[in-house]
Amino acid sequence: MTSRAARVRTVLSTRLAGNRFVRFLAVGGLNTAFGYGVFALALFLGAHYAVAATLSTVLGVLFNFVTTGSLVFAGAAGARLHRFVAVYVVSWAVGILALKAARVLGVDLYLAGLVLILPSAGLTFLLLRALVFRGTTQSNRPEYHSLRGPRYGAVTRTSGRELSPVMAKQVENWGDRKWNENVKRARLAEAIPLSTPFAVFIEPTNLCNFKCTFCPTGHPTLLKKVERPAAMMEFAVFEETIRQLREVPERIRVLFLHTDGEPLLHPRIGDMMALAKSADFADMIWLTTNGSLLDQECAIRIIESGIDAVRVSIEHVDAEGYRRITKTYDKYDELRRNIEFLYNEKERRGSPLKIWAKMIDFNFSREALDKFGRDFGEIADEILLTQTGVWSNDYGVDFNLGVTPKAGYDGQMPLNHKRVACPYPFYNLAIQCNGTVSLCGLDWAHSLVGGELGAMRLPELWNSPAMNRIRLDHLEGNRRKYKSCNGCQCVKYMPEDNELDPDRERLAALLRRSLGL
């Protein structure tokens, strides 16, 4: 997209408050002027009305593909051109029939073409939204793991693979992450040992105002069984964590300000976000929230903090469903209005903040998925439909709610039940709210702890003997000695760039030498 087009889109997005249909109408003025100009010029030069309409349509499609894709739907992938063309073939056919009827009725063709502008625009928008920009084709479906930190499957980014057939569902307005196409890529086995973790989690609190049936934090009896303490991170501990993270040798790729709790419950979450951003040691700072506390004051704090991304976890598409899953919350319409305010406000301010709305697919109906797309497609930069199976050891609780995962979290990564080595401990570091440090952001039971914040500084703790002992156990097939890793669902699916099993012996030898074994 040219710089001028980028400026135009910024103005449109800000002034029109992110309303995609209004943007379509605004951009449609430009497209219409171009198309009608070609049509009128061809008629003036003596062309048959069918030839004039055809020429106008062909040139208009190419022109519209660029303007509509970039200014209205935030990027048009080349693989969608055939659908885009098909929409305009339909629009062209309808237009030809209408012009023919006008001619039979003796209506001036110039006037007929002018009158057809609005109906044609409405038809075209509906077809584009329904058939072109509601998702992607299976060979070009966006890969959710392209920016996911270790909690969600990968830090690295892969592309060009076929979509797994089990992920047949599509959601209207699924994004294509064109803004994220330059994420660094690395084959983990060739990169480790790392001097700096790729991804770091800081847990402001492990408390949550939801009691979700699919989440360990929603099961108080289970938390008591594993003796997980309930706590808020003291701000002084957070400050010390940030100071120590600034000492690591390289920049951290992603800093997640969440693990198992609801971060907006922390009374100083705004100060935490601002401090982490101003420290400037991470390429991206990401907050995940259930959105229930996302009022206007909180939204403004998030925007002004300067963090890069907010992911709102959507649990259902109506109040009744929310109450059934969360056990405590049913203000669905209020939640949506809060997200809409956040989106419109960040657009009004020209903030680069990215907002994602994510929902786990617990075998939702087609109607529910369509509603998810309609409700959040225009008030989020992207909406994401993910699969179940996201926890470490479930201790016998069905966090999948009866759904059997057939692929990884993004619906694409194949399951490998024979995988031995989990890659998470090799690039992932989690500082929990009580100051303990784990090698896995999924360690909700706190059983993969390798140290404490006050006992050793984080740059030394990262490659300490205790941490490397955990990594060696994973490579040697002994990960099940750790409660969180015994029965972990996530180890079954990993992006191919993070596969360690073929390199287990070589990597284990490196760790044995570092441990003096």
Image: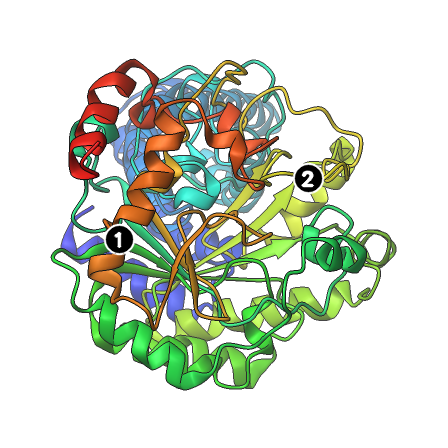
Q: Where residue 394 is drawn, which disc sits there?
A: 2
The 10 Å Cα crowd at callout 1, few under 14, some 14 to 19, many 20 or more, is many
The 10 Å Cα crowd at callout 2, few under 14, some 14 to 19, many 20 or more, is many
Q: Where 460 sits versus 69, above or below?
A: below
Instruction: Name the residue located 37 percent from the left edge and 17 percent from the top edge.
Output: 161
* Quadrant in which the C terminus appears: top left
- Viewer-proximal residue, 183 or 234? 234
**Left or right position of 119 against 355:** right
The picture places residue 179, in percent across and down from the top left corner, at: 29, 47
2 or 1: tag closer to the N-terminus: 2
Q: Where residue 462 is drawn, which disc sits there?
A: 1
Q: Where 281 sits versus 392, above or below?
A: below
Which quadrant would residue 235 be assigned to in this image? bottom left
- Viewer-proximal residue, 356 or 55? 356
Taking the image as drawn, is residue 39 in sight? no
Q: Amino acid at mark 1?
A: Trp
**Badge nearest the viewer, 2 or 1:** 1
